[in-house]
Amino acid sequence: MAYKGIDYLRNKLSNRRSRVNMRYKQYAMKWQDLDPGVTIPLEIKSKYRSVLGWCAKGVDSLADRLVFRDFDNDDFEVNEIFRANNPDVFFDSAVLSALIGSCSFIYISKANYQVRLQVIEASNATGIIDPITNLLTEGYAVLKRDDFGNPISEAYFLPTETRFLINGVESVVPNPTNHPLLVPIIHRPDAVRPFGRSRITRAGMYYQRYAKRTLERADITAEFYSFPQKYVLGTSQDSEPMDSWKATVSSMLEFTKDSDGDKPVVGQFTTSSMTPFTEQLKTAAAGFAGEMGLTMDDLGFVSDNPSSVEAIKASHENLRLAGRKAQRSLGSGFLNVAYLAACLRDDYSYERKEFVKTVPKWEPLFEADANMLSLIGDGAIKLNQAIPGFMDKETIREITGVKGSDSAPIETGDDNG
């Protein structure tokens, strides 16, 4: 098989690195948008830079609900590998990176007979993907950079070996798995975008930029709203100039008549209303919420009546569907990680078809409250009456996320016989 080579993958990563870094800055609320406004001078805009975390909210609202549980039908004991690699941090880091950059990569290595898993963001890794298995045919990753962003430690992944380049010095480590030890975790892949799509969409960035411009204009207008401009007509030319700051903050001003008995006329310019900015901000929030599958409540526009769990689930239907889709695509990537980790642990190249019965399991996207547990319990009783054994405690856990007791039920009876 002809490989593209490390130079090709370096150029490929360089071409896409800026897009990923831009979305990470959007998530970290450090991205400075170009303001197309023409009415406010640049020196004033720079003093009223607004910061808005809607893109971070759109990512976290889904990432916080994607909680990986374990692998079912674990014939190869891959759950032990993940438990040894700090799963509480590992899975959350991989999911969050995939939602921000459209994909993340897991670097699999082995040291002291222990398999190690390391999450690498999309701005530091790339490869050539097999569209059938979603494994890489060859991969490249920057393991360490200097303070200026230049690579210090690089790795080139091939099916039979991994080549490390540290400050230009190359070393080779054999790979017994027959697959590159760099596995992509992809969010929403398709035939056009095999490395997936970011949760931070162009439409979402537009609505956030639109809201930030609205907040900046409102902030500048608030200065004039707080201290409206005033004017005085008919002052004598012989009078002393008025201190503008004193005239603005003073509660009382005194004007005397001149020698002809005339007096000045004091007036105030009409102030701008803040209502249009509030309406613009709500328009931007509605557009962003529709794009991300959120509600106005999620963005800080609190409704009068608190919602129940069922109402929240109904209003987040699009978010639930996005979560289901993410679970399928991300779960496939975690299964590939489990497959190669088991091969590396055992120093044996298993057939991938032997892992088809191993199923990734996720916690429910919405936790059940007491009312929902009661309804599910009544439904389970009726279903089991109609079809005996239709719902067991594992099925209930899939629906509710509540793990039942492992001990046998306590039987009660009459101790006196």
Image (cartoon, rainbow, N blue to C red):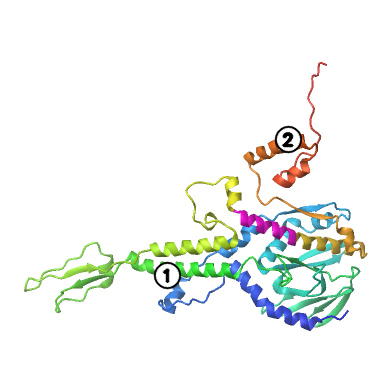
Q: CA distance from mark 2 to mark 1?
A: 59 Å
Q: Residues within 10 Å of mark 2 (few under 14, many from 20)?
A: some
Q: Nearer the viewer, mark 2 or mark 1?
A: 2
* Residue 234 occupies quadrant: bottom left
Q: In the image, what residue occupies the spot 6% across and 73% down? A: 260
User: In the structure shown, which secondary structural element does the residue marked by tag 1 occupy?
Assistant: helix
The amino acid type, in three-letter code, at marker 2 is Ile
12 relative position to 305: left or right: right
- Taking the magenta stretch, the answer to whether it contains residue 317 is yes
Q: What is the secondary structure assignment of the residue under circle 2?
A: helix
Q: Residue at x 78, y 63 (%)?
A: 333
Q: Amino acid at mark 1?
A: Arg
Q: Residue furthest top?
A: 416
Overall secondary structure of the magenta stretch? helix
Q: Is residue 286 positioned above or below 167 on the image?
A: above
- At 69% from the left and 80% from the top, the residue drawn is 15
Q: Which residue is mark 1?
A: 217
Residue 217's x, y, as percent? Answer: 42, 70
Residue 89, image x, y percentages:
72, 58
Where are the magenta residues, as a range? 316-329
Q: Is residue 406 above or below residue 194?
A: above
For the C terminus, give its image quadrant. top right
Q: Residues within 10 Å of mark 1 (few under 14, many from 20)?
A: many
Q: Is residue 71 left or right of residue 264?
A: right
**Contact (Cβ within 8 Å) of mark 2 with mark 1:** no
Q: Which mark, residue 300?
A: none
The answer to whether one can see residue 360 in this image is: yes
Counting residues from the N terminus, which is met first, the one under dot 2 or under dot 1? 1
Question: Is 86 or 346 nearer to us in this picture?
Answer: 346
Compared with 330, 3 (above or below) is below
Q: Give percent across and percent down for residue 191.
A: 74, 70
Q: Tell me the residue that label 2 is attached to.
A: 381
